Image (tube, helix red, strand yellow):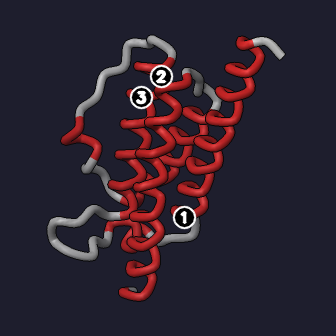
Amino acid sequence: MNRSTNRGDEISTYASELRWILEEIVVALEGLTAAQLDWRPAPTANSAHAIARRVVAATRVYALGFGCGHAVERNRAEEFTGTGSHVRDVIDAIRQLSREISGREALVESIRHAALHLGELRLTRDLAKQHG
């Protein structure tokens, strides 16, 4: 097997793993009420909605910007705004992003970053459900 085939397989594997994480974020969001999506476990903690928005923005920068060389702008402060009543926009952005992923280094960083936030989101979701 030549080197380019191995690299192609490797990138496909990374892209598949990142798509799985992004889909798990969608699963964690679906079924939550707007109040649960906006609930924060502590005053300085992020809501489920904010966590998902952050993953979308950061993954766009890593995967599309660094990995694919696309011009990607990011407004970090805006990532933590919005309300759970607009969760469908976040879910649509995640699914669109999943279709555009490539680039080895960017994928590896995106996987690491998104996986951290998936754990944070799952914990926040579970606490929000218990809270009401």
Tags 2 and 3 touching, CB below 8 Å: yes
User: If you read the primary sequence from the N terminus, does the residue marked by circle 2 or circle 1 appear first?
Assistant: 1
On residue 64, the disc is 2
Dot 2 lies on which element?
helix
Which is nearer the eye, 12 or 77? 12
Residue 32 rendering spot, x and y as whole percentages:
50, 70
Dot 3 lies on which element?
helix
Q: Residues within 10 Å of mark 1 (few under 14, many from 20)?
A: many
Identify which residue is drawn at 64% across, 30% down.
99
On residue 28, the disc is 1
Q: Is label 2 or label 1 in front?
A: 2
Residue 42 rendering spot, x and y as whole percentages:
20, 75
* Marks 2/1: CA–CA distance: 24 Å
From what the image shows, is residue 12 above or below residue 78? Answer: above
User: If you read the primary sequence from the N terminus, does the residue marked by circle 3 or circle 1 appear first?
Assistant: 1
Q: What's the amino acid at mark 1? A: Ala
Residue 55 rendering spot, x and y as whole percentages:
41, 45
Q: What's the amino acid at mark 3? A: Tyr
Count the marks.
Answer: 3
Left or right: 112, with 43 as reference point: right
- The quadrant of the picture occupied by the C terminus is bottom left
Identify which residue is drawn at 28% across, 28% down.
74
Among all residues in the image, which is located at the extreme left? 43
From what the image shows, is residue 122 above or below residue 5? Answer: below
From what the image shows, is residue 50 above or below residue 34? Answer: above
Identify which residue is drawn at 42% across, 73% down.
123
Q: Residues within 10 Å of mark 3 (few under 14, many from 20)?
A: many
Q: Which residue is mark 3?
A: 62
Q: What's the amino acid at mark 2? A: Leu
* Marks 3/1: CA–CA distance: 22 Å
